[in-house]
Image (cartoon, rainbow, N blue to C red):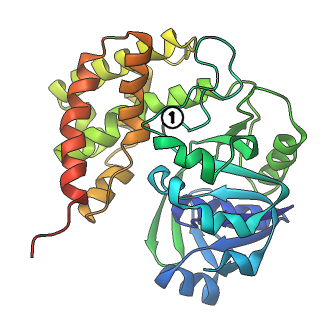
Amino acid sequence: MRIAVLGAGAIGAYAGAALQRGGADVHLIARNEHLRALRERGVRVLSPRGDFTGHPHATDDPAEVGPVDVVLLGLKAQHYAACGPLLRPLLGPATSVVAAQNGIPWWYFHGVPGPFADRRVESVDPGGAVSRAIPVERAIGCVVYAATEIVEPGVVRHIEGTRFSIGEPDRSDSRRCRDLSAAMAAGGLKCPVEPDLRVDIWVKLMGNIVFNPLSALTRSTMAQICRHRSTRDLARTMMNETLDVAARLGVRPSVSVERRLAGAERTGDHRTSTLHDLERGRPMELDVILSAVVELADLTGAPAPTLRAVDAVAGLLNQRVSEPAPA
């Protein structure tokens, strides 16, 4: 299988190195110092499961790679709308695009019968820009349960988790999903093909919708948020409101709020990617995580007062981060 990783950051480089270790023909698309390190030394993975080094081909030019079987998107969701020029050289007639994103994906209502069939979620796909860049028929959904970080250019620390759940947006059983699952498993990753990936989306979203914005607003780690009584209560309320929205859309995750909180607390002083982005002055990935759920609350009639309040203040913070620095 020929695979391109577009946006070979922490998750993308880790998955790419594992896929190459399993025998796939992998091409990493990166830039700057990280790219130079990948070319010179490969991807060095530091993991509690055992360190290893992969040497996939690395470039900053997708045209140098050409059409592949699968593109794994390692970009943040807010960059999807503009990724068309980078993605286009990688696409052949049957190329699949695996979006390893947090939050609500742009394809969420694709192939779903009922009152919301093929509805566009504006927070995720503003004006249909993402759908134009990444046609929904190419999309394979992916929910990432692995935690990784770049400790220096070319070096990825794998903290925990090896699961990359995948599935077709229309819930069909496809050969392309089974083939990708086998390639991931050959590299030492867990890659179950889920009959309805939306359940996994909401299970992970229970944590993201709380800890990503709250970590930025409070400059705190996940464990610190869980150990402070008032923010733990706030987290509990936000998770319950999120489950209410999911239930109105016909999804009922089996994971309880208390179990989700306990799992977050066990991760220790983990700094979310949103907090890292804030500290680096970069726009935060909050539209697909929080604003999209507020939009779905509007769609389904869910009150969600706490989610709306947090979305308002986090949205202002994100706007301030995105503003040009004063002269």
At mark 1, the secondary structure is loop
| Quadrant, the N terminus | bottom right
- Using the rendered image of the protein, determine whether residue 257 is visible from the camera's viewpoint: no
Say left or right for 162 vs 314. right
Is residue 162 visible from the viewing direction of this image?
Answer: yes
Please tell me whether residue 197 is drawn above or below residue 327 in the rendered image: above
Q: Which residue is mark 1?
A: 104
The outermost residue toward the right is 175
- In percent of the image, x 52 and y 68: which residue is there? 156
Instruction: Pinpoint residue 216: horizontal percent, then vertical percent.
Output: 24, 47
* Residue at left offset 29%, top offset 40%: 213
Question: Which residue appears at 76% of the width and 76% of the height?
Answer: 65
Quarter of the image for residue 109 reads: top right
Where does the image place residue 290, in percent across and percent down from the top left?
36, 34
Q: Position of residue 95 (x, y in %)?
A: 81, 55
Up/down of 175 relative to 310, above or below: below
Residue drawn 29% across the image and 53% down it? 275
Relative horizontal placement of residue 42, taking residue 293 as reference (left or right): right
